[in-house]
Each structure stands twice: as structure tokens, then as C-alpha cells.
Amino acid sequence: MHFLDQAKIYLQSGSGGPGAVSFRREKYIQYGGPDGGNGGKGGDIVFEAVEGLNTLIDFRYSQHFKAKRGGHGMGRDRTGAGAKDLVIKVPVGTQILSEDKEEVLADFTEAGKQVVFIEGGMGGRGNASYKSSTNRAPRQHQPGEAGGEMWVWLRLKLLADVGLLGLPNAGKSTFINQVTNTKAKVGAYAFTTLVPKLGVVRHKAREFVLADIPGLIEGAAEGAGIGDRFLGHIERCRVLIHLIDIAGDDPADAFRTVNGELEAYGEGLLDKPQLVVLNKLDLADRELGEAFSEELLAAGAEKVFSISGATGQGIEELLDAVLSYLPDQTSTETKAAEVEDNTSEEADNWSPI
Ligand SMILES: Nc1nc2c(ncn2[C@@H]2O[C@H](COP(=O)(O)OP(=O)(O)OP(=O)(O)O)[C@@H](O)[C@H]2O)c(=O)[nH]1
Ligand SMILES: [Mg+2]
């Protein structure tokens, strides 16, 4: 599946149809009155959030959305046909932003939600509507009202229950592969993961959606590495799992770096429950693990879990803890079954716009 999490599109609602100028013409009636009908209403631009979409990629290929204009008014007092609304389907989790990205104009967190975003223009009045006691044969009529138009940005923030965090190479993708049936790319180099990936975890008859995001480095909140853009994807997670490489340079330092980025990014990321996890336990002996745990506790971690994403050691206990933070009926808007289908490799030709 190709992944794209922002797209700029042009929207235009339909203009109203023009009103008609017409007079009644029938046998034996010499001066029939005006009977030009009004124009029909132009189509609205409507957005609808749908399940089963996890990307905005379709909007890369199709960027202009114009609803049809209303029909002409007609003789014999017939109103022009109203144009059909143009319904644009977006993934759940999509926000619509103003062209300058300063303002959130609509936010779709629930499947099925529909918003009439730009109304179509009203139809123009036909000459029949101008008839009065002083003007029995009006020729006035109106053109239809113009539709509205604007450029907007669509931005997708994935809706996952749990987000995975950590420096590059901490083992996030290995972990998601171990606990879900996702096949995220794993590599012994930084930034193996370029786009977020979702997977469904099934544990003790419960289900939740886990998001793997690209590794964070110092300055990520300002755009370093692949930047702050992906931090947005964990804004809506209930719990964060923070993976730290036990064989990395300095676990406590790694912990502080990542949390520093969460703090710099803001949006409450630092306030979310965070499960701190020493990963790659298979590479270290027990004493080293314990020493690092102590350091992490001293650096502010509430509790430290130790696991090996590669062998699966310690994962049960971690998942138990995750469940304790989730509501009984995990109420994610991302439907588990839909995410599960999405196991194909990441797009190689993905590029930010
Ligand atoms: N021994 C051992 N190696 C691991 C473990 N987890 C991950 N690795 C290795 O660590 C390297 C990085 O793993 P990834 O899962 O790609 O790490 P990541 O955090 O997703 O990295 P980025 O996507 O670059 O941020 C790979 O070579 C993995 O094989 C583990 O539990 N034990
Ligand atoms: Mg990765």
C-alpha cells in the first residue's frame, strides 16, 4: 500500500442554474403570463469519513474536485434540476486544513461522518417570479449564484491505540512484526522505516491497533531526520511504548532525547502514559539490564520493562500492561480487520510533498 499523509486539493461547488425567461404560449391565449422557472441548485462539496482507507494516496492522482452546476430553469414554471452533490471519501483520522495550514476546518474521527463543506450556489430566479400587478410581462431573470471554491490541505493522522517510539534502530519494526501479523521492514541501519505502519495486536481476547513510526532523533520536533510530521501520528494514541536499545550507546540518554522531542512537539505527547522498555535483552546479561533499568528509573521512567523483540522474551508482561491502559472494549475507530489486510511492503517510491 502506498502511504501519503498529506495532500493539497482544489474544491469547487457547483454554481446554480440560471432562471428562465419564458411566456405561456397556448392556443387561444394571446398574452400568456411569464412562466420561466428558477434555476436548480448547484452541487455541494461533501466530505465523508470511511473505514478501510489508511492513506491519502488517491489524492495525489486526483486533485481537483468540482461539483456540477444546477440545471437551467425552464418554461411552464419548471425549476431546473438540482445537481448531485460531490461526495469525497477520506480515511477516518483525516483533518481538513486551510490552504496556509493555520486552521483546522474539519476533523473526521468517526466513520460515517459527513460534512457539507462548500454549498452549491442557489439557482437564479426565472421571470415568473418577477411578475407583479405593475409588471405583468417581466423579462428579468437571474443567472445562478456562483459556487464556492478553495484550496485545502488534507492531513491524515492515523488512529492507533498504541504508538511505538524510539531512536532509529531501537527495534520498533521488529517488535511490531513480533506482536502483529504486519511485515514491517527491518534493517540494521537508521531510518529503515520511512512511513508509519499499523498492525493489530491480539492479546488475551482483546485487540488493539499498534502504530510503528519512523525513528526519532534529536531535533525531530523541528523537522530533523524525517521529522515532526510523524509525531502527529501518535497524537491520538492512548499509550506509548518507548523502546530503548539495551546495546545502544547510553539508554538513559536515548530516553531523554526522545522525551525531549515529545516535549518540544507538545500536543500532550509527554503526558501520555509511556511504557519504558529496554529492548534486545538477548544481547545483554542480567546485570547490565538491571543497571540500565536503574538509570532509566533515575531519569524519570515510572517502571521499566525488559524484552527482546527478536525472541519474544518479556513481551507477555508488556502487553498485559498495555491492556491495563486501554478501555475494556478497545474503542479504536480504526477497525482491526481493515488494518489487518494491509500487510504489503512499504512504498519504495514514497516521497513527501
Ligand atoms: N538481537 C536483537 N536484535 C534486534 C532486536 N530487535 C531488533 N533488532 C535488530 O536491530 C536492528 C534494527 O531493528 P528495526 O526493527 O529495524 O529498528 P527500528 O526501530 O524499526 O529502526 P528505524 O525504522 O530505522 O527507526 C535490526 O538489525 C534488527 O534485527 C532484538 O530484540 N534483539
Ligand atoms: Mg523501523
Image: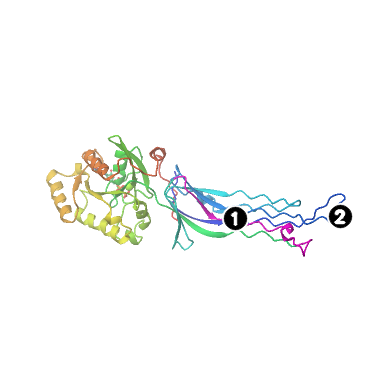
The amino acid on which the numbered mark 1 sits, given as a three-letter code, is: Gly
To which residue does mark 2 refer? 30
Position in image of residue 93 (x %, y %): 42, 49
Position in image of residue 131 (x %, y %): 74, 60
Majority secondary structure in the magenta region: loop
Q: Is residue 159 left or right of residue 115?
A: left
Q: Is residue 127 left or right of residue 258?
A: right
Residue furthest top in the image: 205
Q: Quadrant of residue 137?
A: bottom right
SS at mark 2 in the image: loop
Residue under the image location 24 percent in, 40 percent down: 320
Does residue 116 appear in this view? yes
Q: Residues within 10 Å of mark 2 (few under 14, many from 20)?
A: few
Extent of the magenta region: 111-139
Foreground of the two, 35 or 98: 35
First in residue order: circle 1 vs circle 2: 2
Does residue 250 appear in this view? no
Residue furthest left in the image: 287
Position in image of residue 177 (x %, y %): 32, 40
Q: Give how far apart the Cα atoms at labels 1 and 2 are.
A: 39 Å
Residue under the image location 83 percent in, 52 percent down: 25
